[in-house]
Image (tube, rainbow, N blue to C red):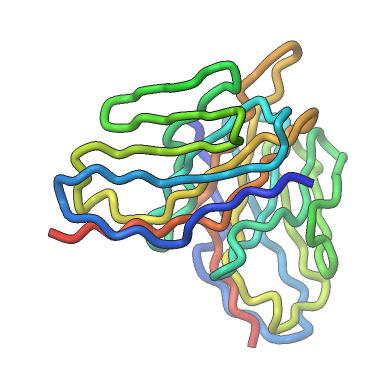
Amino acid sequence: GEDVEQSLFLSVREGDSSVINCTYTDSSSTYLYWYKQEPGAGLQLLTYIFSNMDMKQDQRLTVLLNKKDKHLSLRIADTQTGDSAIYFCAVRNSGYSTLTFGKGTMLLVSP
Amino acid sequence: DVKVTQSSRYLVKRTGEKVFLECVQDMDHENMFWYRQDPGLGLRLIYFSYDVKMKEKGDIPEGYSVSREKKERFSLILESASTNQTSMYLCASSSYKKGGGTYEQYFGPGTRLTVT
């Protein structure tokens, strides 16, 4: 089945850019997603990208997709302390309604 | 906005008890999902349902069952709770659109279950 890998931890200073990376194995995946989870809460959808796109920008968020390398990244510009959370990469399983999630990257933003 | 609600935020049960976790969504979504989230293991899919009375096993169905009698409601049942089922349980829903759709899932706030 699909496998999704993320680094577990990222620490940045307030005002810097953050880049969270994700790799996946199924080259036929059509939709790829980024979710944010704040402490004690459920997952909140941040953005998604369709596999025929290379890039998607939404305010401070930029998603880059490299299909050849099966690599997805989320860049957060001007990172704020309120961005501290766990970020999950998820990939739609080909032909199904289910998603496979990475284990999550904990982003810590220090003042 | 899509709203997914879960019956309890925190639950404490004893070993051997039967436990019901309820999830309700208000967006007429066809698909509903139950996950458990554990530190270091991420989200693991327990069961999902793509229609009323339909269910499919996910990656870790052992020790769990589900019920979907109405489109908006999906219940997770622990027939005989055990300590290794102490976890955060997350419910999600998504829409199915014939011919296309983005399949994003919307999550409830989670139920933190402790089995003692």
* Quarter in which the C terminus of chain B is drawn: bottom right
Residue B1: x and y in percent read 45, 29
In the displayed structure, B102 sits above or below A37; it is above
Name the residue: 42% across, 36% down: A46
Name the residue: 82% across, 71% down: B79
The reply to whether residue B72 is visible in this rendering is yes
Q: Tell which residue pokes out farthest to the top in this image.
A: B99
Residue B37 in which image quadrant = bottom right
Name the residue: 73% across, 45% down: A2
A38 relative to B60 in the view: left or right:
left
A108 relative to A22 in the view: left or right:
left
Residue B9: x and y in percent read 50, 63
| Closer to us: A18 or A49 | A18
| Closer to us: A52 or B7 | A52
Residue B15: x and y in percent read 73, 86
| Closer to us: A86 or B24 | A86
In the displayed structure, A95 sits above or below B109; it is above
